[in-house]
Image: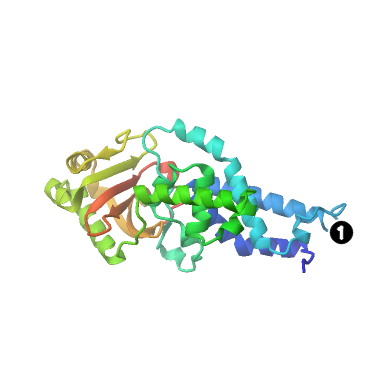
Amino acid sequence: MPENITEDAATRAFADHRELLFSVVYNLLGSVADTEDVLQDTWLRWSSRNSANTPNGGAGGDANTPGDIENPRAYLVRIAVNTALARQADISRRRESYVGPWLPEPLVSGGEGDAGESAERTEAVSMALLVVLETLTPLERAVFVLHEVFGYAHTEIAPILDRNPSAVRQLAHRAREHVQARRPRYQADPKVQRQVTERFLKAALGGDLAALMELMAPDVTLWRDAGGRRGPLRPIHGRDRVARVITGTARREDTARFEIRYRTVNGDPSAVLFDADAPFAVMVLDLEADGDRVRGVYAVANPDKLTHIEE
């Protein structure tokens, strides 16, 4: 039976589910800053409805107020998802005017303060998959994330998006086909990925063209998101071009000043380059499904996207 939720209980309910909400919304938006804004709006809606339904909060609320709901988790997910979808138009406009390739803000873990990190926070999908999800419609992406990443049934997603289950199944089918065609889902061996990342960084920072060519697949693509401050303004395709861009950048930079710290980024073994204890860039490699050659290089060097990274 539904039970009345006191103000303290409402606060605890939100805190209990905050990491889940963060992970769901981050996978929808690919931005830590926008995710935090959505969670703030979600909290305000949750707490204000609870206040309206308490004895000192005025008249009783409707059937959707926290004091009357049976499943706070489901209610909070619904608020968060729909708040994120409502922000999509504004986010899309910002990305259309973004200078250079746009990449998601990396979720970095593995530092000294991350020992107690929530498992739900680590449900962020890989950088490579997030790039593919950018090509879905907002509704297709919401269905894909809820169903494929968090295991929600179509019948559970339907009330979240205010759609019938048949429509949700159609959205799920289109999204799954779209993603599968562009990036079949698989999990690279973490040990292999770490080893390749170490070899790749050594070759890249050392300007070793031959070693880079050996590590990369012929159809490799480089995305370098620097917010228009430096670097190519479009993704670079092909092993020869990518290798020459990377070695050319190494020649222009004083690479000896960088300190490499190997961290987990969106679930994958990756590297963070620090310059005088400040994050300079995050490097994530996407490997071929049937080998250890690099097919995607994702370098986030926009300082605005690295502010949340700690030493």
Q: In the image, is 278 to the left or to the right of 9? A: left
Where is residue 10 drawn, in percent x and y?
72, 61
Where is residue 107 drawn, in percent x and y?
44, 54
Q: Residue furthest left?
A: 210
Q: Residue furthest top?
A: 97
Q: Residue furthest front?
A: 166
Q: In the image, is 35 to the left or to the right of 303? A: right
In the image, 258 versus 135, the foreground residue is: 135
Where is residue 63 drawn, in percent x and y?
79, 55
In the image, 106 versus 125, the foreground residue is: 125
What amino acid is at disc 1? Pro
Q: In the image, is 66 to the left or to the right of 109? A: right
Badge 1 is on which residue?
Answer: 55
Q: Which image quarter is the N terminus in?
A: bottom right
Q: Is residue 192 above or below residue 22?
A: below
Asked if one can make out residue 216 in the rendered structure from this viewpoint, the answer is: yes
Q: Residue at x 52, y 49 (%)?
A: 170
Q: Residue at x 77, y 66 (%)?
A: 2
Q: Residue at x 75, y 54 (%)?
A: 64
In the image, 151 versus 297, the foreground residue is: 151
For the residue labelled by badge 1, is the local secondary structure a helix, a strand or a loop? loop
- Figure disc tally: 1
